[in-house]
Image (cartoon, grey):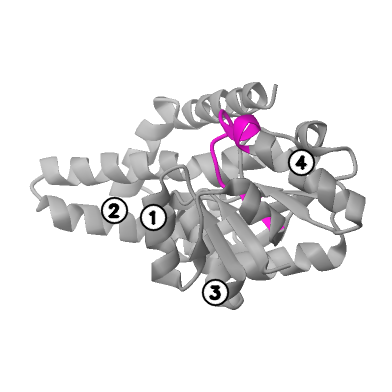
Amino acid sequence: MKYTAAFIGAGNMGGAFARAAARAIDPKKIVITDYAPEKAEALAKELGCSWTSDNAGAAKESKFIILCVKPQVLPAVLEPIVPVLLEAEARGERKVLVSIAAGITIAKLRSIAGEKQPVIRVMPNTPALIGSGLMILATDGSAGEEEMEELSAMAKACGEVRTLDERYFDQATVIASCSPAYAYMFIEALADAGAKMGLDPETSLFYAARSVLGSAAMVLETGISPEKLCEMVCSPGGSTIEGVKVLREKGLYSLVEEAANASYRRNIELGK
């Protein structure tokens, strides 16, 4: 095969994944496609990869066919690639189908692409765009250990790479991939509060974002629970505890849970 990976879709996540892959393997072993050919061409020129407007042609020449498209359009995008997969299977040529589409199960992908087709699901999050993301991989055993390792190596420049049983993929998508939007909203709200108190808006945004970044690092690096870390900040009779009381009284925990459950329900709907 001419290429190691074909990236079908050059949007934000597809672009981030392709950039990571181009740092892990020879960019000449990557081909990029997109419904807007100019996007594929621009990204390919940036990375030193090949590009084409022919999804089926890219798939024919590649080992990993990485679908970086929205779940709503994935079946239509996959349809012209299916004959390529079936022909490869008949020749005894192994290809691996990879999807980053939320909600679309391995079983559904295989129902379209063929029951013997090796499939890997990947769930990225937006911090992958700057190499600080989380890439979660799942397979049902159809993809071998070496193939999982090869894909993991291509994804590592996006950030942390973890594997997970697919049974928990919809839940993990909420906590790992939807959650940055929740975090951005909290940072924005905190920065706006600071600006209303008189801080320069740009300064307030930096303070808010930097504090959230440091707080997350404390959780990951110390192993101390968020509850305990919160207690460590809240001196009795101090200013922090007054704000924490308001967040608890106004139902922050239940509101976050409600938001997460709404995202989870949508993941399930997307997979039907």
In the image, the segment drawn in magenta is 64-77
Residue 175 percent location from the top left of the image = 58, 42
Q: Does residue 222 appear in the picture of this structure?
A: no
What whole-number distance in Å separates the C-alpha atoms at marks 1 and 4? 48 Å
Secondary structure of the residue carrying tag 3 is helix
Give yes or no for residue 74 being in the magenta stretch.
yes
Q: Disc 3 designates what residue?
A: 27
Residue 190 percent location from the top left of the image = 27, 43
Secondary structure of the residue carrying tag 2 is helix
Tell me which label, 1 or 3, sits earlier in the chain: 3
Category of crowding for the residue at label 1, using alpha-carbon neighbours closer than 10 angstroms: few (below 14), some (14–19), many (at least 20)? some
> Mark 3 against mark 2, which lies toward the viewer?
3
Kind of residue at badge 3: Pro
Give the camera-side residue of 208 and 135. 135
Give the camera-side residue of 55 and 150. 55
What whole-number distance in Å separates the C-alpha atoms at marks 3 and 4? 26 Å
